[in-house]
Amino acid sequence: MSEAFGRAAQLLTQTYSSISDTERKQAEEELRILSQDTKGFFQFLLTVISSQDSPHQLKQSAGTRLRNFMRECIESSKLAAEDRMYLAEMIFQTIISPNIDRSIRGITNYALNPLISDDAMGLCCNRLAALAIVGLKGEAHQVFGSLSVIKTIFSCMPSQFNAGDYSKILLPHMIDVGNKVFFQLGAALQSSNEALAIEILYIFEEWSLSLRQILEHFEVVSNKGIKEFVEHTEIASIFTNTINIRIPDFRLPNVNAVINLSSGTVTNLMNQIKANIIKCLNIVIQYFMDCKKKIYEEMGAKVISTIGAAIPDSPFVDSVNAVLEPLIISLLAICVHPDVDQFIIQSWLSEIVIETLNLLHKCSSESRFYGIFGQFYKQIITDIILQFLRLNESDKELFDTQPDEFVNICQDICERQESETVKTVSAQLLETMCDNIDGALPFSAYFAFELIESIINPEINKEYPLIKELANTVFMASDNENKVATAFMMLSILSFGISRRSDLLNGINNLLEKIMTAFFSTSSSMIIHQRVCQFLYCFSEHIFQDKLEYFKRWMLYILDCILQQSSRAVCIQACDTFSYIMQEDELMFRLEPFMGEVVDKVIEAIPNQKEKSFYEALVEIVQNFGESLDRKVVPLMIALVGKIQSEVQCQIANNKKDSIIVIKSWNIIRSLINSISVSGADLEELEKLLLPIINYIQYPDQVSFFDDIISIIQLIQKKAKSISALQWEIFNHLPVLQAKQENTLQIVFKLLNTYLRFGKDSFATSPQRMAQVVEMAGKALFAQPKGRIREGLNCEGAILYHLLFQTFPGQLDQYMDKILTDTFMRYAQSTTNNFFKVRLLDTILSSFTYNATLTANILSATQTAEGISYLRFSLLEIIKMANQFTHQYDKRVAVIGLCHLFMMPQMNNDIYELIDKIFDTVIVILSYKKPTEEETKQKSPIDMLMENLFDSDEDSFDSEIFVKGTKLIYGGSGEDAPGEREEKEANSILVNLFSPIFVVDEYNVFRTMVSQLHATNKDFMVNLTRNLSPVRGQQLVEIVQSKRIQINDLPGENTEIRRVVKAARRK
């Protein structure tokens, strides 16, 4: 090794051996500098890995750094195509080197991952595949390394590649390797040469993993690859022969098992190889099941339907047929072993057991294999499935220490079956067998019925035939708690199948009826209670359709389980079941006759209840039965208020944010107030009940649910149509909330709107309250949350000013100077969006409506830097922006405000000089019509783009246009531009806005103004109309002749329907 390499190796050693952080960081920095010579650094790392003199830990460190450095180089595009090819070959040669062990070989192999994943042209994959073919014919270490590389190719290959080309080239050589290794293994095992057998088994394992990776790749990408795979029929023979290898097992002395229960290097490797092969068979069998029709058609058969048809003939199907019985017998032998629970959690056993159960699950749905399942189904159910489903010590510990996880696992086993564990796959096998194998479903169901009844409430002298038949099975030796819990779980798994059989549903009802009294009075097992609650989750919609009393007792039992404090797992499951019942309409209304008792138990449960699903159920109760809960409202409200208080105290103590329980509780309170019919004194009593949590509005830094408080207050105000004394106290705290929101209003704006609406008279008599609203509006107008200008939020301040002018005629004279000054100051700042400019101009227009003469006098008294009066400036801006008054609210404010200028007793000079343009502007605003959906559809994308290009303001036009040849490509992702998002945000403020202006028809205002001018100053009116262009003149005629038609017009909604009504011609 050169001196430079020696120094680099020393630095690499320091990165994992140095005690000092300073030395380690210094070594890392020097290595980073050395790595700037990319090719030289790669060569150094590969030399360290392949050198016989390098210590194991140094090789490990070099392998890890090689992987990370390769990823960095690929991500930064440092490597040219020829460099990548060179490095791929160098890494391959290192992987097949004889001087590295399997662990280092694996770490080094990871360095190929980024190379292959980023191999857009397939150059590296082609080179590695060619090298692997040569390596498969070499020595043992070369074969092992080549198989590892093949596995990496198929695990990292980009999906756009035709992987079938690689498999066609590689599979013949891999078949040769498989045959060779199989015979070598047989010879080593026969000669009891364990060392040689282990060496061969490691290669055999890598071979099986490579085939598995190839099939898993095709499973995701293309069935075509699997089709080509199964054409290599020699592989099926290797699979069959390998699975049937039997290694003597001292734990299974009298069974010729193909799965080993004894742990050792040879047996563990053999189990892993068989697990990989069975996984391959699972993928292949699934392919035959999915493509059955297509395969038969390719064979020349005319297929209308494949229902009931066997999967096509294939050596792989024959292989499965040959190994099914040995695998079943092996599982039966394993399950009867007394220590199976200890072994099944070990990966060397669990993986092969899961893959075997998966294979049985797939095969039990295919008629070709019905014979073997007809022979073994009882044993499979009682000796395999029930053994795996029963509770072991790990389950019991989980029940106590992680109850939520325990319930999730149970739910997954019975319903979702998303995870791949021994229990979930056993459940899948049970379901599939009971769906397809004659006798399996009634056998399972009646066995569970007998088991539960015989333990919970046995009848004297009654015989239980199935229990008698199965008395000597291992499962029957379990304790009673385990047997009952497992029986209930089995019924839950089979709930769908049982629900389609009236005889079995009758059996369910009979069972529940028989055990009810004894179970309620004697059962103390929390695990059984959890399983019963889960059972009711699965069967509640089917039980006791015509026996309400029995149904009621079981439903109240669920609530009793929620109330108990002994087991959280029982409570969680009971809450999930209760929530499910309340979300199913048919079930929920079956509870109606005894809903009072249900609510009583719910109220009792609230103080100690922390499960989200419980509160989801309560929301459903309130929303569906709120009107019938009159007598329960007060205790329910008291319980919810107490719950929020206790949660908040806990949060403050632990410095945490609002919990989901607080959010749910507020939602329930809101739904409750919405659904009940109360008014007057009752609302005041309700408000007093809520006072403890409403008072949190004074401490916005401690809680984050002040928006809930505001929405509740607003809801009560709307119901009462008045403002209570308590609410006026809350009003005094609103500036604190605004400060908390960095001077924006947001939800406070809606509350202020209801204060102005229902407290109008109180504002008139309380100058302090009026001053507070004016102050809050001004702060909102200039707010910059998080240092950013948000014009959509600034609109709240402007609209609040509008509301003041619209709501309090003649009462704002003392505030007009401030309001108009604030408006012009904000307008002079960087206003980038036209919608915001319009809302600021709306303030001036609202002021005209309030008092045109006073507004004109105030604005005339001040001039801009250019010497133009603020009055003239504002009028010019309104005229210039006429086409931007498109929202119905803005149109109404503008038209009404401008019309008041014409009715002034004496016009200011600025107004008089611009009066023709003002009249023209009013017509433009009133004539604007939003394009209909049909008109928009008729425009081509090019037309719309060009129209936007010419019509839009330069500031607001932000589309990107790229020209490629003669094609226009539109930039952007289809999402709203920032300005559009802000405009939507600003317009959302107008939804459900209440203002006196909404009862005024701007068309009538305009027509009345025209009529009055014509009557009082005809010459002036004639001059106005004479100066109009022909287009404006026609628009004026249409406006005068039009009539508004209101269709469910909501305040603040941007909708309008008008039609022109022409005068009837006289005959």
Image: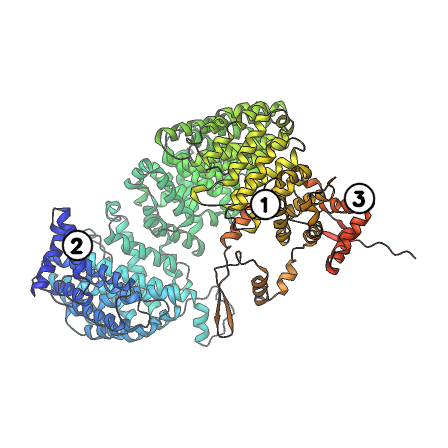
Query: Which amino acid type is marked by label 2?
Result: Glu
Residue 741 got which mark? Answer: none
Task: Tell which tag, 2 or 3, sits nearer the viewer.
Answer: 3
Q: Earlier in the sequence, mark 1 or mark 3?
A: 1
Describe the element under mark 2 as helix, strand or loop: helix
Q: Is residue 719 visible?
A: yes
Of residue 703 and residue 512, the one placed in the foreground of this image is 703
Q: Residue at x 73, y 59 (%)?
A: 1029
For disc 2, the marked residue is 28
The answer to whether 893 is drawn above or below residue 97 in the figure is above
Describe the element under mark 3 as helix, strand or loop: helix
- Please tell me how crowded label 3 is: few (under 14), some (14-19), or many (20+) other residues with Cα within 10 Å: some
For disc 3, the marked residue is 1012
Q: Earlier in the sequence, mark 1 or mark 2?
A: 2
Of residue 256 and residue 849, the one placed in the foreground of this image is 849
Task: Tell which tag, 1 or 2, sits nearer the viewer.
Answer: 1
For disc 1, the marked residue is 839
Q: Residue furthest bottom?
A: 300
Query: Which amino acid type is marked by label 3?
Result: Gln
